[in-house]
Amino acid sequence: MHLSSLTLENFRSYSKKSLNFSPGINLILGDNGTGKTNILESIYFLSSGKSFRSSSLSQLVRWDSTYTFVNGLLSDGTDLEVQLIKDPNKTTLGRKFYLNKVVKTRPKYLGTFKTVVFEPEDIRLVTGSPSRRRDFLDSVFATTEWRYAGALSQFNRALKHRNELLDMIRDGKSSRQELFYWDQSLIKNDGIIHDFRLKFFKSLNGYFSKHDNSEIRTISLNYHPSFLTQEKLDQNYSYELACGYTQSGVHRDDFSFENDIFSASDKNLAFWGSRGQQRLAVLALRLGQISYLEDSYSQKPILLLDDIFSELDDQHQNLVVETCHNYQTILTSADKDIQLKLPTAQTLNI
C-alpha cells in the first residue's frame, strides 16, 4: 500500500497544492525555501494528526487562514483527511479525522498508514537533551498506536495535576490522601508506555546485531528507563513534596547510543564518536525503526527523507538508496545531482 495522491489547502506556505506519487521513489526537487519540507510535514500530519517540526499545530495553518486540511488517497482506494479549524472563541484548534469521508476518533484513525521521517536534525538525538530522545520515542508510535498515544496523554495530564497537588499539600491547602487517584493513573499509564518502549529497544538492538553492515553491527542502544511504582512514590514523597515535582516515570526516561569499538568502561557515542559515527548511528536508528514497524504491523511504512543526503558520505548515501528501493520513498533535495543516485525516481519540481 502506498500514498497515490496528496492535496493541501492553507497548509504552511501553500494556499493550494496537489501532487501525485509513484509507488517507488519520489524526489521533490527545488531551491531552499520553496516549501519542500512542508510537503513531507503534511504527509506526516496526514498519518498522525501531528507535526514532526513543531509542537504547535497552529503553525500548520497558513498565516492568513482560519483552517487547513490535508487529503490523501492510498493505493487501495482509502480516502484520508485531517482538518484543523481555528475557532475565535477557543484557544485550541479543532481537529477532525476523516476515513473514507466518515469522521473518526483519532484512536480509530491512527495506523491507517505509517511513516518514518529522516531529517538532518536527527544527529541531535545523539548529543542533544534527554527530552529530544523522549520526543523521538513518542514519535515512533505517533502514527501507529492509539494505546500509546492515549496512555501518554493521560500520563501527562496526571503528572500535571499531581505536581500541582504537591504544591498545594506543601502549602497546607490539600492532604496527601488526594494523591491516590493521580498516583494510580500515573502507575497504570507508565506501565503501558514502558511496555512499548522496552519492546522497541529489544527490536532495535536485535536488528543492529544481525545487520549486513559491519559498522551497524557494532552499534547498540542503552535504554535508561525510570520505572514508576507506588513504593517508589512513597519513598520519594518527602523529596517530591519539597521540590513540587514527580521524580520517577516515563518523563524521566533516556537512552544512549553506544559502539563496541570504544573501551569497555564507556561506549557512549555522544562523548567519543566522530561526526560520521554519530550520523551512522542515527541512520541505523531510523533503519531499525522501519524494521520494527514492518515486523510489528506487517505493513511497510512510507519513508520521508528531508534533505539527508547532504549529511552523509557516499558509502552511507548508498545504504539509504538501497533502503529506498524497498519502500515508497518521498525525499527532498535542492541538489539536482541527487538524480544521478536515483535514476528511477519520479522527480517533482517545486
Image: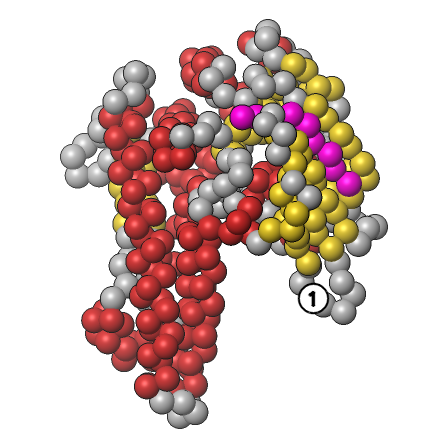
Q: In the picture, residue 208 is in which quadrant?
A: top left
Q: Quadrant of the C terminus?
A: top right
Q: Which residue lies most toward the left here?
A: 264
The amino acid type of the residue labelled 1 equals Thr
- Direction bottom: furthest residue: 172
Rendered residue at 32%/86% (across/down): 177
Q: Position of residue 117 (x, y in %)?
A: 52, 33
- Decide: is 9 above or below 193: above
Residue 53 appears in the rendering: no
Q: Which quarter of the rendering shows the N terminus?
A: top right
Label 1 packing within 10 angstroms: few (<14), some (14-19), many (20+): few
Total tally of numbered discs in the picture = 1
In the displayed structure, does residue 274 sit left or right of residue 81? left
Residue 79 appears anywhere in the view: yes
Q: Secondary structure at mark 1?
A: loop
Give the residue displayed 28% in from the left and 77% down from the top: 237
Q: Over which residues does the magenta segment extend?
A: 1-9
Dominant SS in magenta: strand
**Is 55 one of the magenta-colored residues?**
no
Residue at label 1?
Answer: 91
- Percent position of residue 67, x then y: 77, 51
Q: Residue at x 30, y 50 (%)?
A: 195
Front in this rendered view, residue 190 or 277: 190
Q: Please indicate whether residue 133 sits to the left or right of residue 216 in the image.
A: right
Where 114 sits versus 342, above or below? Answer: below
Q: Give coordinates of residue 4: x percent, y percent.
A: 65, 25
Name the spot of residue 147 as percent of width and height, x first: 42, 53
Q: Quadrant of residue 276?
A: top left
